[in-house]
Structures are given as C-alpha cells and as structure tokens.
Amino acid sequence: MSKQSKISKQLKKYVLFLPLLLLLLIVTSACSNNGDTSDGDSNQETAEDDKLAEIKKAGKLVLGTSPDFPPFEFYVLNDSNQKEIVGSDISLAQAIADEIGVDLEIKATDFNGVLANIQTGSVDLGISGFAKTEARADVMDFSEGYQQEVSDGYQGIIVPKAAVDKYKTLDDLKNAEITIGAQGGSIQYEIAQKLTSETNIKQYGTTDAAIMALDSGDIDAVTVSTSSASQVISSFPDLTILPKDGFDLDSDNVYGTNVVGFPKVDNNKSFIDLVNKVIQDNKGNGNIEKWKDEAKAQSTEAIDAE
C-alpha cells in the first residue's frame, strides 16, 4: 500500500470520528452549563427569598403588637403630646431592628388582630406578651423564651371586692357559674374556659375593656395576667385580684414564658436565628430586665389605646 493510501484511510477515520467527538463536547458543555445555571439560580433564589434578606431590602421591620398590656406594650403621650407606643416588648423589637440595621415600623391592632396578622404574614413578627400554646404552634413559629411571667406575676382573676367572701377556694368560683370576661384570642380566654362554660365567657378587644365591664357590673370576673393588671386596677377601687395562694390559674407555669411569634413560612430560619441571638444577648447583659423595670416606671403614664 502506498504512503498516500495510508494517509487517506487515516483521514477517513478522523472524519468519521469527528462528528461523534463534537457531539460529545456539545452534550458535555450543555450539561455543565445547565448545572451551573441551576446552582446559580438556586443560590440566587435562596438569597432573594430569604425572609431576613427581604427585611433588609425593605429597610424596615414590621412589628405586630396590641398596645394595651403594660409594662410590655402601651401608649403614652410623648414630648410632642402625641400618642407613642412604648414598653419592654417594644424595646426588644427595636433591638432586633437595630441588629438587622433597619427601621422599626409598628402595626398596632387588638390582640386578635395581632394573631391574624402573624398568620397572614402582614407583619414580620409579633411581640405582644405572647405565650406559646399548641393551638398557636399550628399556625405560627416561635422564638425561644425571653421572659418569665412568674418572676413578678401570675395568671389570676379580678373580682369585685364585695364578692371576695363568696370564693374561699377556686372550686367555689367554678361552682358559682359566673360570667367571666377575657381578652379575645388571649391565653386568659383559654384559661377562662377552664373556669366556666363557653356561654358564660365574654370576649373583649382589650383587658382594659373587660375590667371596665366588670366595674360596671356587666360581668362577674376577669381573667388576667397580674403583672399587667395590677397597674390597671389601681384606678378601680372596688375591684381586687384574688390571691395567688389558691387562685393561681397557671400553677404549672404552662403559659409562663413570653415568646416572639413569626409567620409560619419556609424561609424564616435565618431571621428566627437572629431574633434568638438578640434575645440571648440581651438576657445575658441584663437588658431584658432593665427594659421591663423602665417600662414599669413609665407605665404610670399609660393612656387608653382609644
């Protein structure tokens, strides 16, 4: 065979092999590009959809709260004679906003409204003297606990002073089948259900409204968090809180820890982690207690939410 023939046969082999090689290179390149694009899009999507990133982009942290619960959240008149929401929970919310580096925007509603806004995602978080319950856990997420109710109060009940002698024990109160007022959506409403029938419970938008109804004789008692109600009933000389000994409605401390509530969504983890860090830092440095002490002193200036 001539040298030219040999070269010709080799060229034919290369010509036949070349399309296969090109096809292999194209497929490999496409797969590589598709993989890179997928990873890039996935990473970009995660970054853009992350709740913490959304808050940073918006430049604000939207807080849901019910400002009728001193010393946690309540209204005062500021130096400009305008209503302003203050309290230990508001201080915590501000610390969270500062940690993120955004402004704090407060969306104030009644307590039921706060719960609804958390569930619908109309707010970024809710801080309003919350306690974690199984029912709430089904529809929202929670931070770790930041404050204990038992440190300076308990879940109790307010009655007229004239009725105190009727209730020697908690069983006496239950057997009386009285009409009890409670703030709608609150743990105090849940507690009231253990004291009397559902038909004997009246819901109110605020605890203050329930206490005023009790003072007017419209109902027989009000279930309350005593750490908040003690300040309120100082304005009602005919009312009293039944003693903790015998009338602690949460002796097992089921509702004793305050938590932050979040919309139940998939992209909340980094945001909740940040909130937990702020809680840990400010529990450790004593700010949580300091904020509460400051709010207690300021709560003497509290005004009605209306």
Image (cartoon, rainbow, N blue to C red):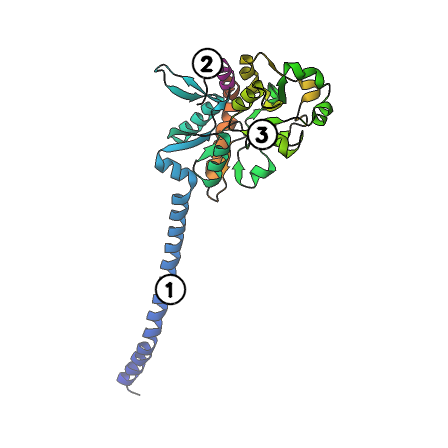
Q: Quadrant of residue 153?
A: top right
Residue type at the position of mark 3? Lys
Within 10 Å of the Cα at label 1, are there few (<14), some (14-19), or many (20+) other Cα atoms? few
Instruction: Give the residue displayed 40% in from the left and 27% down from the top.
Output: 98
Q: Does the magenta segment cover residue 299?
A: yes
Name the secondary structure under disc 2.
helix
Q: Residue furthest top?
A: 237
Question: Dot 1 corresponds to which residue?
Answer: 28
Q: The N terminus is located in which quarter? A: bottom left
Question: Dot 2 corresponds to which residue?
Answer: 301
Residue type at the position of mark 1? Thr
Q: Tell me: 271 left or right of 17.
A: right
Q: Does the magenta segment cover residue 204?
A: no
Q: Tell me: 279 left or right of 191.
A: left
Mark 1 vs mark 2, foreground winner is: 2
Taking depth in this image into account, of 202 and 228 the one nearest to the observer is 202
Using the rendered image of the protein, determine whether residue 268 is visible from the camera's viewpoint. Answer: no
Which badge, 3 or 1, comes first in the chain's sequence? 1
Q: Main secondary structure of the magenta part?
A: helix
The magenta segment: 291-302
Say which mark, if any, is on residue 202.
3
Residue 226: x, y in percent? 59, 20
How many angstroms separate mark 2 from mark 3 (CA)? 28 Å
Name the secondary structure under disc 3.
strand
Within 10 Å of the Cα at label 2, are there few (<14), some (14-19), or many (20+) other Cα atoms? few
